[in-house]
Image (spheres, coloured by chain):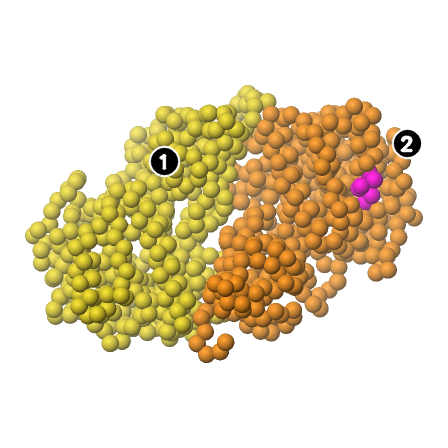
Amino acid sequence: MQNMQVVVRRLGSARGVLSVCQWPEKHSLLRRLSAKAQSPRPILSVAPIRALVDEKFKVSVENLPPAAPVTVHSLHQSEDQDCWEAYGHYISDHRGTVSVSEDLSFGGTYSGKEPMGLLWSMRPVPGSRFGLRLRKMDVCAPMLVNISVFSGHEGFREHTPLASVVTERWHVAPGVQRVEVTIKGMRGTLFIPPGLGAFPGVLDIWGGGGGLPEYRAALLASHGYATMALENFALDDLQGKNLDLNYFEMALDKLKNHPQVISDRVGVVGLSLGAIFLLYLTAKSPTFKPQCCVSISGSNVWSSDNTLKGVYKTLFRKFDKLRLGENDSHIWQDVGLEFIHDPTNVVDMTQMLRSAGKEHLVTSVIYYDAGHLIEPPFSPHFRATAFKVRGNEQNVIMLWGGHTKPHADAQEDSWTKILTFLKQHLYSSD
Amino acid sequence: MEGKKRPVKLSVHPSRGLVDEKFTVLVQNVPPGFQLTVHALHQCEDGHSWHAFGHYTADSTGAVNVAEDLSLGGTYSGVEQMGLLWSLRPVPGSKPGLRLRKMNVQTPMEVTVSVFRGHQTEGFEDQGPLVSVVVERWYMAPGVCRIPVTEGGLTATLFLPSASGLFPGILDLWGGGGRLVEYRAALLASRGFASLALDYMTPKISLETGQMVENEYFETAFRVLQQHPQVLSSRMAIVGLSLGSSVAFQLMIYSQVIKLRCAVCISGSHVQPAGGSVKQTLDYLSRNSGNTCFNEKNELICRDLVLPIPTDPKLKADVGQLRCPLLLVVGEDDQNWAVSESAVDMKQMMEQAGNSHLLTVLSYPNAGHLIEPPYSPHTRSSNFRSSVDNSFVVLKTLWGGETVEHSRAQEDAWRKILTFFRENLYGRGSALVSNL
């Protein structure tokens, strides 16, 4: 079983980082003997110790001295070998207990009563590269998070932890199958819940970053939906190739016709550019007919010539209006990718639906102070990350926006609403 | 309900649990009042199939919650959150005398939980369920390290709660059936205790020499555990079951080397040649083999081997000399050892010696001999390989216990064992006084 001893590659403030990511493997005899024979030893527990990434856990520490200042800390090494951490400062009660679910954090990377703060407030450890984003690409293996408790608040890193446990966070439930598919030369991955049965299905379309993140589809399959994650075009590609929206129609058909999918119980979820496409297709395509749609941080911007090339041109027609934000990051708000916290676009869509007599079909949820990248709950928030655009050789830093706590709340709340919405339309409807 | 029907939704939380954690099984999206069977299926390492099931009726919202709703029948009835595990039994047509034990603890036990239409009692393998999920039950928490140990001629496995940190140490001893049984030690490590599972009946050294181990073997095991860099040398304990308890009594009272903070003896007796070896204890029991008998099902009952409890002090471990807290776990329907009578005698000895404040007895009505981690299926009788006159025979042996009460005893005892270990090994080490 792999352990959590890691050595950080980039050692900005070397000593500080080393003490976080590497615990000494051997304990000297002297230290063991000097551990006072009679004093109680703290007990740290996390339950459940293995969970799906959208499940909550309870972290508690017992056997501390009463009214003791301690820091509860989380540490994770990503697939890219970067270290992420979060921590909260607590004070034990008269019984010497700290309960992260019940008690208040007095500072750290989160404060207040935050049962899941150790996950959603994670950020790269000091000395890391700038603009990192935490995404799990291999969803069949769990995310390992080391939870520890240290003595004290300020300077807690100087000590060895009082206790430490490793917890697993999974995107797939046991028995979920992963199948790679190709549609017109583009990649997709199908996740099927365990068992023989036919299931409601979901088509999951990603944003303009390209690639094929599978974690949302894996999670939806763990909730009982045969889900196909579909690669979207990188924004680059919209300019160059002669791309065909038929690709999405074929994908939806392929999913509906799968032997383990109930063809009249299939919905679509799209994020960002994926949402733009799904909204257009649902409105305009005679064959793209999902039972329901979820649009995350999307927009109904389109171009009159109905080609992807046209969409690209529309999106970038205002490119000269590009603004530079903090740290020279790009702000694309005026360009066409509306942030969800700007209600203007939602109002626009609602008006269009109202004039078509279909307003009752849509539910809009607006999260103020949330950023663009609304991911599954308890994922860390990224205000600005590296992003590839326009065939440039260099990455730019894209400002997605949002403030960490409101963004975390938005992720948790929106995921619950998405699951309830999908269940209502794909499971419970007759 | 034919034609366009709504798909049934089934969820189990957590889908990956430790074997001593509870789970919640929730069925949704069926018609209100719908009759269904929730079914569990497990294929064990020996290839045998085990199953359990409960009959339910959905409520007005079209849901069944196994933790809150009544099972109307099946392999368990009533409100039984974990009935799908503890009532597991071999499927019809299986070989008799089976016992469910996980020998490879590095992989989880996989259970398929399904929903069937109607109140079914048989033929599950012939019909397709309405829906299924897979549930994993683990003996090892993430981060627990499993380390085979051969140092000092031992056949043992060490489980550490994690690769770094300091932990109390527990020596884990099973009974006369032998083999290296790891699952309880793995679970103790998952709960924060460095634990050494020790094979003392069939270790490599005995197979090579043909000789049973002497008490030095156990002292070596204790020393190896205590001296491990991640083990706190002053926070040591023993847990034993059955013959393992007999060994534990000898070690905690007569060994000069072994110093314990506390001990747990499950289904054990102090009746044995005082200060003797395992061989001497087994020889003593063999001499009394005339006391054994068979029931109407031809199952061997051994409980009379130690009866009547001797008055001769040379034939009992002198518990009056104990200086550390002792937790005894006894099943009142134990048909293999006379544990209740032994517990009564131990209490008397300790009261006379003035150390009875160290003793806690957990006595469970209708529980049998094999008091295992919680939610383990109850084995009332099984094929047991035991030694008779220097050779091994396999006999169908009666352990005792009634399934429902035995399962409650396992759940309750484990929680109390963990609390006992936490207070004595993580706490200040004060003695416990309670007779429950």
Q: At 74% from the left edge and 48% from the top edge, which residue is drawn?
A: B367
Judged left or right of residue B54, residue B204 is right
**Disc 2 residue type?**
Asp
Can residue A342 be seen? yes
Judged left or right of residue B274, residue A162 is left
**Disc 1 residue type?**
Gly
Q: Chain B is drawn in which colour?
A: orange
Judged left or right of residue A59, residue A306 is left
Residue A340: x %, y % from top left? 23, 53
| Relative to A298, residue A51 above or below | above
The residue that disc 2 covers is B312
Image quarter (top left, top right, bottom left or bottom right) of the C terminus of chain B: top right
Which SS class for mark 1?
loop
Q: Colour of chain A?
A: yellow
The residue that disc 1 covers is A112
Q: At 67% from the left edge and 65% from the top edge, which residue is drawn?
A: B91
Instruction: In this rendered view, identify the residue nearer to me: B48 or B212.
Output: B48
Q: What stretch is highlighted in magenta?
A: B337-342
Instruction: In this rendered view, identify the residue nearer to me: B422 or B247.
Output: B422
User: Label 2 neighbourhood size at 10 Å, few (<14), some (14-19), many (20+)?
Assistant: few
The secondary structure that dominates the magenta segment is: helix
